[in-house]
Image (cartoon, coloured by chain):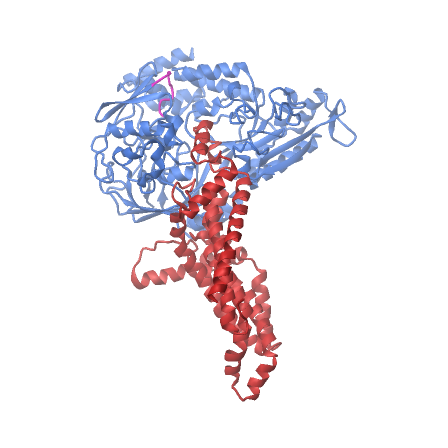
Chain colours: A red, B blue
Amino acid sequence: MSQYVLRRLLIAIPSLLGISAVLFFVLALAPGDPFSELATNPNVPPEVQAALRAKFGLDDPIYLRYLHWLNAMLHGDWGFSFVSRMDVDKLILQRLPTTLYVIGSAQILALLVAIPVGVYAATRPYSLFDQIANTLAFIGFSLPTFFTGLLFILIFSVNLDWLPFVYSTDIKATGIRWVLEMIRQAIMPVAVLGLFQAASMTRFVRSAMLDVIRLDYITTARAKGLGQAKVIVKHAMRNAMIPVVTLVALQLPAVFGGAIVTEQIFRIPGIGSLLITSILSNDTPVVMAVTFVFACLVVLFNLIADVLYGWLDPRISFR
Amino acid sequence: MLDKELRSMIGQVKDGRMDRRAFIQRLAAVGLTAPLANQILALGGVAMAQSPSPYPPTKRGGGGPLKLLWWQGPTLLNPHFATGTKDQDGSRLFYEPLASWDVEGNLNPILAAEIPSIQNGGLAADAKSVTWKIKPGVKWHDGKPLTADDLVFTFEYASDPATAAVSISTYADMTVEKVNDLTIRILFKNPTPFWANAFVGAYGCILPKHLFADYKGGKSREAPNNLAPVGTGPYKFVEFKPGDVIRGELYPDYHMPNRPHFDTIEMKGGGDAVSAARAVIQTGEYDFGWNIQVEDDVLLRLEKGGKGKTTYAVGGDIEFIAVNFTDPNTEVDGERSSMKTKHPILSDPKVRQALALLVDREAVKKAIYGRAGRTTANYLNGPEKFVSKNTTWEFSVEKASKLLDEAGWKVGADGIREKDGKKFKLLYQTSTNGPRQKTQAIVKQACQKAGIDVELKSVVASVFFSSDVANPDTYSKFYADIEEFQIPMTQPDPALHMRRYISANVATKENKWQGQNYPRYVNKDYDAAIAAAEVETDLVKRAVLYIKCNDMLWQDTVFIPVMHRLTVDACSNTLQPVVSGWANRTDNIQDWYRGA
């Protein structure tokens, strides 16, 4: 098994290199320039813009810039933001807690809703409960988050005035009041994201469960006289969870990547909003760092998912 | 004659025979108003009226928190690196210049003890030097005193090309010397009638020498204080997260009495303009929302029974359609829109005039800008003293058609005009932006009625405004027949605004399209007038020269002004902000207070 993990990690190296090269060249070829805002400002002569470009090495050939970047990355230097003039890793670390909190909570909410609902619906297919759950799931994943987000704001902030819609990272309170405020301001974004995720995941859990529940070993377990709860939880669910684990594992990197649209709507200072503002202002080092970390996480979580399979189903062997 | 009359009036004001207000009214009657009047008086030896904005609070602090919402959050806090106004706004909370521009475009002393004038010996008669006196007793947030050394250092820091400061040109062509601990003298290389640029406004913010001395030049980006400002401003730095939030707290040793009013200040970034308007006007979560570029209909709806309102400030920002004088479709030496070509259609002045008649500015104002725009015939729209009264505009399809007929463009069988077998077709480009696309549609419709076929094109803003030499879609390459965008006027003086269009500034392949004269307008008279204005020390004559330049641009239809745009902000009903159209939003932040 450890050999398997090692081999997978070694395979990951060339693929990560490939990903970084593609990202870098695509970004370098993309139009735009981090100092374009200076162009219409009559106070700033074009020479200043040219000097800035030279200072940040933007005029070097692309392959040289890539090698510089790669070399720095290997030494743990993530780069330097053109726009903020500070180190990229600081910029990312500053925003990570918020993203983990909001997006992580949303994922947990999604799991908490999807697994019980999906499993229960699968045990009683085509019952009233199943029909309602299905309908809601369809509505849930057909509505985009920017729509539900605005709807929530209109209802809960503007009309009812219950919840704030501007997310604040420093709440001026301590102790229990701080905790309550943190929860209060996260309710809307977490609900919007969590329910959207839950909708598609419910469908997934349900169909995975339906596949398993018809198998012979479940009938055997029932014939043995085991109770319904034990059959479902211990025997059926463990096997049904294999595809669900893949889905969740592949979604976990998104917890770090943030949710671009939702973060923008609620002004959550997370990685997603960092990425979008960096893209808009052509701050390549930041875009590069965020997307590359994201790529690393996808590779890593794929590996974790594969290892988890073996634990869930000992028949799957590592070769 | 005007000159003589003026001098005698200045004399009367000096002796107190005529009051200042009457003087300004007399000047208004001849089309030269308030800010000019004040500068004339300053040159004539009468001290500038300090425009005290009413400030009722009688003690420092006690105003609670001030919550500002900038939908583009500041990303750095060194005013000399600030690429956008958002960064200047954020830096200005902590750093201060010698003086700032007030609502009318007058200078308001901040760190200066007084505004230089001829009378107090601050201004030299030859316009080649300015002496500023610094207010005594001002302390940096870390307790060290502010001295002339800090100003001299700020000049050295910004003017060093290795520092790569964006304010470098503000400090070009001058030297700054220390006279004594609280006095500096700026010596200009050439006579500089507009002396109030260095140490004034956003790029005038003064840095503490004791914290930045080691980070001048190549090491500038390593300064820890780039992200943790220590200034002299009304608020002391607490916390900064780029793009997200800036927090500050009241500075108890601030140098102005009873200021600031608020105990803490927070500037939150992110989101979009509409929801920012909502958070200020509708729910009242925030006190002030920056740059609310939202359709007027939406704002009016939000304002109904809301907790806030919109506020407007008049500056000189102009949205216009520029006309290409060269041919964008012929390539000469690998360059389109080359100076060696002439535009096949638009080089005819009658055609350009016809085009100007087809832009329905009233409709654009009504349908798009609402209260945030004013119609105008001028390229130069402020300050008042520089605004030409000689120009007019109108919208008339009939008159345009008549002009086009005269120019030999006859309506063809398909309703499109043609001349010598060539169809009248124009490519009209702009950046992707709701109001601009709507303006394009309005203009296109009118052109169709007059028999002109207009093809519309919109380019993503990050490309359109970029200096990318390889990209054909930038505004400076101008590979189109006409193009629309906005040029902001960053200071209440037309020098930089008007200088762009001299022949030496034409954008060409040779200068990598960095020349700012993208219509490729060439007019010897214009060049001469600009050259004369730049060294003219008589402010009246100087104003007249710039008005003449504006009129030339109008006469030759280089630009078709679409809208004189005002700045729009959202503001809670209880907040009393002081916002000048001639400066950054936060340039007078010390005077903000909360009242009924």
Percent position of residue B354, x then y: 64, 25
The correct choice, above or below, for A240 with respect to B174 in the image is below
Q: How many marks?
A: 0
The correct choice, above or below, for A138 with respect to B86 in the image is below
Residue B58 lies in quadrant? top left
Instruction: Please name whichever residue, B533 or B382, is drawn nearer the observer in this view of the structure.
Output: B533
Q: What is the span of residues highlighted in magenta in the rendered image?
A: B188-196
The correct choice, above or below, for A144 with respect to B134 in the image is below
Q: Horizontal placement of B39 versus A123: left or right?
A: left
Q: Residue furthest right?
A: B413
Instruction: Please name whichever residue, B291 or A100, is drawn nearer the observer in this view of the structure.
Output: A100
Percent position of residue B463, x then y: 55, 37
Residue at position x 35%, y 13% in the image: B8
Instruction: Please name whichever residue, B596 or A261, is drawn nearer the observer in this view of the structure.
Output: A261
Q: Horizontal placement of B371 versus B142: left or right?
A: right
**Is-magenta flag for residue B328?**
no
Judged by its main secondary structure, the magenta piece is loop
- Quick check: can you spot residue A194? no
Residue B206 lies in quadrant? top left
Percent position of residue B393, x then y: 57, 26
Percent position of residue B19, x then y: 32, 22
- Quick check: can you spot residue B164? yes
Which of the image's four quarters has the C terminus of chain A? bottom right
